[in-house]
Image (spheres, helix red, strand yellow):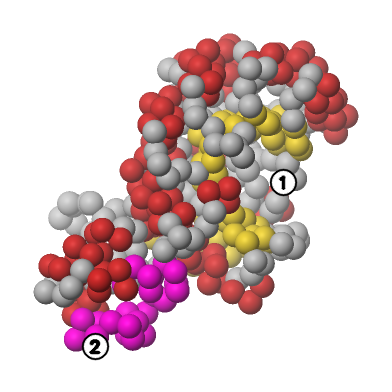
């Protein structure tokens, strides 16, 4: 039994099942997440017999760092080797899973880009991760361990604040329960104690997930991958739009309950000569006119796909067109592009070789 990813309630119940008072589960929870103490033998707050029993019956499993690639901008892309799917009932030894995580340091913070699935089923045409197809969902523990590994690997250079973004491999809202379980632990003041402003979930627009997230008491910030200015264009670039078209997506955004400090973020990958015209910008401004929102413009990061990087002049013209129509807009700097760690690049050669062949869904 892997303890990472277990909630406070689950660890309390575990303690009781082992014949201990439930507060022992709370002590275990604090050790794992608040203190980030992952060695059961060193959790001296727990009595020695309990530590021995936990060591015999449970584990705290971190993924193995199979590869690390450091960028000239000091970002690091990690290839992490996970075990087989925990729920696998195969009689033979099932295949291990490889995922990628990115650590991006800044002067006053570090941002950790984590995956919620191995591969991705959404099949956005401009994203290399789509070429992997969906391998499997990650558990809450496997999501959390990416944060723990990145923090441990960079312990000597950590800034005061940590941001976590669900912008790695996979569609978080298609692995809803595990993603939200991990989020609750990240945001729990008694857990990893990140502020809600510091955790962002990015979705391609899974409407049932957005509506479900709207009702959560504890939730991350929400970012929507827009990437197009009309339905025809978006369906071509993002097949998920055929199921959840722009009108329905924006209606869900309008009913989404924003906190007083919060805006919706719309991410827009600029593809040279495809979706980066001034007319596109004007249409985007009209789409977002009734929303409390901001736009992050992301010049496309190159990969072996039939698109090209937009011209700097086109990026600036797009930005000015949005700003001139009252839409807050920022051009996001791509970190780690030289080591394939930037947005849309997480499908490295070594990962593809480590995974079984899967066909992307259409």
Residue visible at 30% across and 68% down in the picture: 26
Q: Can residue 119 be seen in this snapshot?
A: no
| Left or right of 135 on screen, residue 324 | right
Q: Quadrant of residue 62?
A: bottom left
| Secondary structure found at label 2 | helix
Expressed as whole percent of the image width and height from the top left, the position of residue 67 reads 54, 65
| Residue picked out by circle 2 | 48
Q: Which mark is residue 227?
A: none
Q: Quadrant of residue 43?
A: bottom left
Between marks 2 and 1 in the image, the one whose residue lies nearer the viewer = 2
| Left or right of 125 on screen, residue 306 | right
Quadrant occupied by the C terminus: top left
Q: Quadrant of residue 272?
A: top right
Residue 324 against residue 31 in the figure, above or below? above
34 or 271: nearer the viewer: 34
* Mark 2 neighbour class, 10 Å CA radius: few under 14, some 14 to 19, many 20 or more: some
Instruction: Indicate whether residue 230 is drawn in magenta.
Output: no
| Residue picked out by circle 1 | 334
Instruction: Indicate whether residue 34 is drawn in magenta.
Output: yes
Residue 165 against residue 144 in the figure, above or below? above
Residue interval drawn in magenta? 28-51
Residue visible at 65% across and 47% down in the picture: 342
What whole-number distance in Å separates the C-alpha atoms at marks 2 and 1?
Answer: 48 Å
């Amino acid at each position: 039994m892997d303890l990472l990813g277990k909630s406070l309630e689950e660890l309390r119940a575990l303690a009781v099942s082992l014949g201990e008072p439930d507060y022992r589960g709370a002590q275990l929870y604090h050790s794992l997440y608040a203190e980030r103490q992952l060695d059961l033998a060193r959790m001296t707050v727990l009595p020695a017999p309990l530590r021995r029993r936990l060591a015999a019956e449970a584990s705290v499993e971190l993924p193995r760092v199979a590869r690390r690639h450091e960028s000239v901008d000091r970002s690091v892309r990690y290839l992490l080797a996970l075990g087989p799917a925990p729920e696998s009932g195969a009689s033979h030894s099932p295949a291990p899973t490889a995922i990628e995580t990115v650590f991006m340091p800044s002067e006053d913070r570090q941002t950790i880009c984590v995956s919620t699935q191995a591969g991705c089923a959404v099949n956005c045409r401009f994203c290399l991760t789509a070429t992997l197809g969906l391998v499997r969902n990650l558990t809450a523990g496997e999501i959390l361990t990416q944060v723990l590994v990145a923090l441990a690997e960079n312990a000597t250079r950590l800034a005061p604040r940590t941001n976590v973004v669900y912008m790695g491999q996979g569609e978080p809202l298609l692995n809803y329960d595990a993603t939200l379980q991990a989020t609750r632990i990240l945001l729990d003041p008694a857990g990893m104690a990140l502020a809600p402003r510091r955790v962002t979930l990015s979705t391609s627009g899974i409407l049932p997930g957005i509506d479900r997230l709207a009702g959560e008491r504890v939730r991350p910030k929400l970012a929507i991958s827009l990437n197009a200015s009309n339905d025809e264009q978006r369906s071509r670039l993002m097949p998920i739009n055929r199921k959840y078209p722009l009108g329905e997506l924006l209606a869900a955004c309008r009913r989404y309950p924003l906190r007083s400090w919060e805006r919706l973020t719309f991410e827009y990958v600029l593809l040279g000569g495809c979706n980066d015209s001034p007319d596109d910008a004007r249409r985007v401004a009209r789409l977002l006119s009734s929303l409390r929102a901001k736009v992050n413009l992301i010049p496309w990061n190159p990969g072996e796909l039939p698109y090209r990087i937009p011209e700097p002049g086109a990026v600036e013209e797009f930005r000015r067109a949005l700003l001139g129509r009252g839409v807050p807009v920022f051009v996001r700097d791509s970190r780690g592009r030289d080591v394939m760690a930037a947005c849309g690049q997480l499908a490295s050669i070594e990962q593809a070789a480590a995974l079984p062949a899967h066909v992307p869904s259409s």
